């Protein structure tokens, strides 16, 4: 975007004329040929301001993943043979004039590189609009999700009450779908920490440039009735180099087969397109949570998750939800997140032509569900497994948690953030220290250099499960 401005001004010869009123600039020698090169041009006096070089995400052409040209006014017709004309540009102030000439590099939102303040002030000085509009904060409802509170005045409410209301409301939506999810945090300040800027969601929120594949790519089986056969159902994946179907779930139980837990495979579930309409045993995660979940404070690793119910080996707990982002967007967010809630959907990297840069990433920081509070352990009791419901989408699928062993009620639920960890790897300086407390603790959460200085998560579900899984 910045380059548009740069090339634009390359074509324009500025001739500041001190005699012009109000710091007007006069532009001469703009040829139709040169304007033609630029494509869009102007039909009214041109004001060059930082806003000119901003492109919105709404300009993205969703179908092609490309930037649409900005919508521009119709081009002026330049008569043949009359190649020169004069445009006067109102230049509101010397500081804006300076901005136009200096062409600052926009590498930060500081006043130095992006002089919003001075431009605003100069516009205000010219009485083009008021410099600052004052707003009485207490009259502005917070954007928090507080349900149907239309017209409610929050003057008498404090932030604490609003956050609690917001969280309780979003939490109540989850309760409708399954057993209770609740906070067991006595200290008010800790509760607020858990609640601040976070809302519970029931499904992924797809952000800019994240697109599911067209429906025609998705599929289901043709099994009749509600009884898909383990040796026939076409939803099931096959073994490598064999026609044998892999059956993920145990017969008569809503649980994964213990053998499947040792695999590095994706689960393909039956769905509403199938002959069985998803009513067969090859659909577990879509039926929802079956255990109560409790968010508590661990004392040394922030918040954690546990269940007041006993959980058997292979049983499904919940999905990991959040905003789904492009890798590019996730990388930017990662730099800002102190504690990371980013999970790459990278299962197909390596086995398809999807590159590391093309993957989508789930961010559970601001929107998510209870699993966003699950901590790492070097000897975990849960495992995260990719689950495809639509079958056609290699980039967009779910991440589901299953119990690796029997988990007695009240035990903290954990999983391995870095299952591909090479045991020979040494503790790297600056790595995030692991406090799981297991006797076989590896000492660090992330050994890789990119994460060394961050308190962040980026679980690689494509990596094989750690050997500690079955202990
Ligand atoms: C996805 S969050 C887990 C929930 C987090 N504890 C919270 O309070 O929101 C990941 C973060 O939890 C912390 N964490 C998780 N497991 C840990 C462990 N075993 N040792 C130390 N910190 C851990 C790290 O700060 C990590 O960046």
Image (cartoon, rainbow, N blue to C red):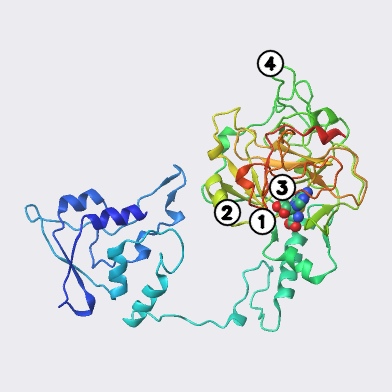
Residue hosting label 3: 320
Q: Is residue 214 visible?
A: no
For marks 2 and 1, give the one nearer the viewer: 2
Out of 101 and 68, give the one closest to the viewer: 101
Residue assigned mark 1: 365
Which structural element holds mark 2? helix
Give the Cα distance between marks 1 and 3.
11 Å
- Per the rendering, the mark at residue 241 is 4
State the residue at coordinates (73%, 30%): 264
Nearer the N terminus, badge 4 or badge 3? 4
Report if the beta carbon of the residue with label 4 is closer than 8 angstroms to ligand 1. no
Question: Label 1 neighbourhood size at 10 Å, few (<14), some (14-19), many (20+)?
Answer: many
Q: CA distance from mark 1 to mark 4?
A: 40 Å
The relative height of residue 108 versus residue 249 in the rendered view (above or below) is below
- Using the image, tell me which numbered label, if any, was put on residue 258: none
Is the C terminus in the top left, top right, bottom left or bottom right quadrant? top right
The first of marks 3 and 2 along the sequence is 3
Q: For the residue carrying disc 2, how many other residues have a C-alpha within 10 Å: few (<14), some (14-19), or many (20+)?
A: few
Decide: marks 3, 2 in contact (CB < 8 A)? Answer: no
* Mark 4, secondary structure of its residue: loop
Q: Is residue 470 left or right of residue 243?
A: right
Relative vertical location of residue 76 with respect to residue 247 in this rendering, above or below: below
In the current view of this chain or complex, which residue is farthest to the left?
81
Q: Is residue 427 above or below residue 1?
A: above
Q: Is mark 1 within 8 Å of ligand 1?
A: no
Labels 2 and 4: the sequence-earlier one: 4
- Residue neighbourhood size for the residue with mark 4, other residues' Cα within 10 Å, grouped as few (<14), some (14–19), many (≥20): few
User: Residue 335: which disc?
Assistant: 2
The kind of secondary structure element at disc 1 is: loop
């Amino acid at each position: 975007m910045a380059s548009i401005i740069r090339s634009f001004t390359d074509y324009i010869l500025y001739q500041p004329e001190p005699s012009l009123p109000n710091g007007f600039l006069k532009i001469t020698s703009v040829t139709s040929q040169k304007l033609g090169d630029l494509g869009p041009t102007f039909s009214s006096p041109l004001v060059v301001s930082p806003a000119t070089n901003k492109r919105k995400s709404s300009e993205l052409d969703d179908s092609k993943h490309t930037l649409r040209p900005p919508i521009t006014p119709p081009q002026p017709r330049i008569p043949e043979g009359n190649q020169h004309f004069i445009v006067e540009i109102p230049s509101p102030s010397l500081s804006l004039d300076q901005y136009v000439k200096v062409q600052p590099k926009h590498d930060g939102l500081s006043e130095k590189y992006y002089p919003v303040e001075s431009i605003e002030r100069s516009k205000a000085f010219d009485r083009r609009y008021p410099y600052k509009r004052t707003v009485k904060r207490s009259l502005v409802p917070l954007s928090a999700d507080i349900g149907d509170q239309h017209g409610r005045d929050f003057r008498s409410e404090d932030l604490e009450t609003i956050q609690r209301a917001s969280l309780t409301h979003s939490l109540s939506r989850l309760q409708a779908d399954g057993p209770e999810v609740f906070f067991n945090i006595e200290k008010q300040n800790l509760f607020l920490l858990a609640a601040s800027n976070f809302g519970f969601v029931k499904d992924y929120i797809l952000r800019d440039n994240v697109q599911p594949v067209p429906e025609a790519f998705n599929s289901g089986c043709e099994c009749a009735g509600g009884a898909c056969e383990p040796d026939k159902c076409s939803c099931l994946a096959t073994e490598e180099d064999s026609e044998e179907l892999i059956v993920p779930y145990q017969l008569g139980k809503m649980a994964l087969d213990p053998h499947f837990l040792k695999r590095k495979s994706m689960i393909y579930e039956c769905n509403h397109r199938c002959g069985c309409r998803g009513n067969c045993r090859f659909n577990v995660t879509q039926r929802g949570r079956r255990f109560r979940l409790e968010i508590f404070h661990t004392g040394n690793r922030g918040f954690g998750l546990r269940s007041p119910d006993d959980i058997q080996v292979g049983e499904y707990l919940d999905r990991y939800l959040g905003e789904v982002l492009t890798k590019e967007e996730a990388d930017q967010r990662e730099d800002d997140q102190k504690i990371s809630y980013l999970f790459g959907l990278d299962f197909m990297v390596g086995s398809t032509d999807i590159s590391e840069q093309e993957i989508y990433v789930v961010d559970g920081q601001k929107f998510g569900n209870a699993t966003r509070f699950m901590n790492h352990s070097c000897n975990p009791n849960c495992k995260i497994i990719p689950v495809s419901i639509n079958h056609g989408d290699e980039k967009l699928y779910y991440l589901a948690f299953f119990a690796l062993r029997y988990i007695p009620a009240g035990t903290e639920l954990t999983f391995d953030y870095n299952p591909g960890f090479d045991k020979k790897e040494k503790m790297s300086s600056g790595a995030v220290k692991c406090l799981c407390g297991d006797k076989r603790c590896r000492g660090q959460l992330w050994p890789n250099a990119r994460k060394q200085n961050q308190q962040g998560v980026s679980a690689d579900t494509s990596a094989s499960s750690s050997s500690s899984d079955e202990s």
